[in-house]
Amino acid sequence: MAHLSSIDPVMAETIARVGPCTLAPNPNIFETLVDAIISQQISVKAADAIVARVRAATPGGLITPEALLLLEQDALRAAGLSTPTARYVRDLTERVTDGQLDLAALDKLEDEEVIKNLVAVKGIGRWTAEMILIFSLGRPDVLPVDDLGFIEGVREAYRLEARPTRKELLERGEGWRPYRTFATWYMWRIRRLTQGNERERTRIVSL
């Protein structure tokens, strides 16, 4: 993190306060995507409960394309998914199963190509795709300017009176290249520390 510390005194202060970055990507892209779709617009606690029920409904408790393909939409609804969310999970499962979406090939693509492939799936937008770049593919230079936790982290770290605009975040992020993912992680951590939440962000959630 020497680069970030050397170019930005606020980042240097944040890194000193937070400590070493412990971001560890989860290579299971399918499971992470299902988790992300389920977690949209609901609390982390609710998402955890639903994911647990989905696991309970699959052979061996596995969230894989093969396992979810065996579940009817009614079974997903019974696990707590809304009708649209169940459709999104089904669409993802079918696209992966029939080869329309090759998750194994994503690692070979540039960031924007990964995003283009993922947003073709119902229920997956740019924000979710950016989170996959960070949490599954381990890309080092992602700047999720629409992520509320990141926005609030920047506001608090830089002691801004109002939330920074998208344009302001993009401009600030230019100085963080080519390590914008790590800058983002530190903004998440400072946000959670300010909230008194010591739990590290390891899942795709909006805060």
Image (cartoon, rainbow, N blue to C red):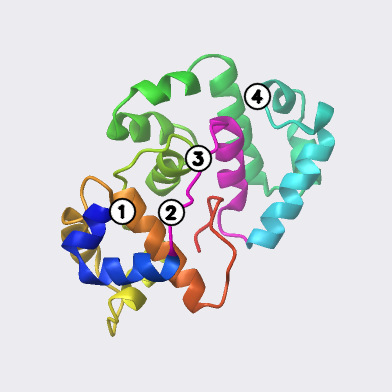
Q: Identify the residue under disc 1.
A: 1
**Residue at coordinates 76% horizontally, 53% vertically from top-left?**
49
Q: Position of residue 103 (x, y in %)?
A: 49, 23
Q: Amino acid at mark 1?
A: Met
Q: Which residue is mark 3?
A: 25
CA gap between label 2 and label 3 equals 12 Å
Left or right of residue 98, residue 21 in this image: left
Q: Amino acid at mark 2?
A: Cys
For label 2, the residue is: 21
At label 3, which amino acid type do we have?
Pro
Cα distance in 3D space between marks 1 and 4: 37 Å
Residue 142, x across and y down, in percent: 32, 46
Q: Secondary structure at mark 1?
A: loop
Q: Is residue 103 magenta?
A: no
Categorize mark 3 by other alpha carbons within 10 Å: few (<14), some (14-19), many (20+): some
Q: Which residues are magenta?
A: 19-42
The quarter of the picture where residue 153 lies is: bottom left
Q: 35 above or below 63?
A: below
Left or right, 132 with respect to 4, comes to: right
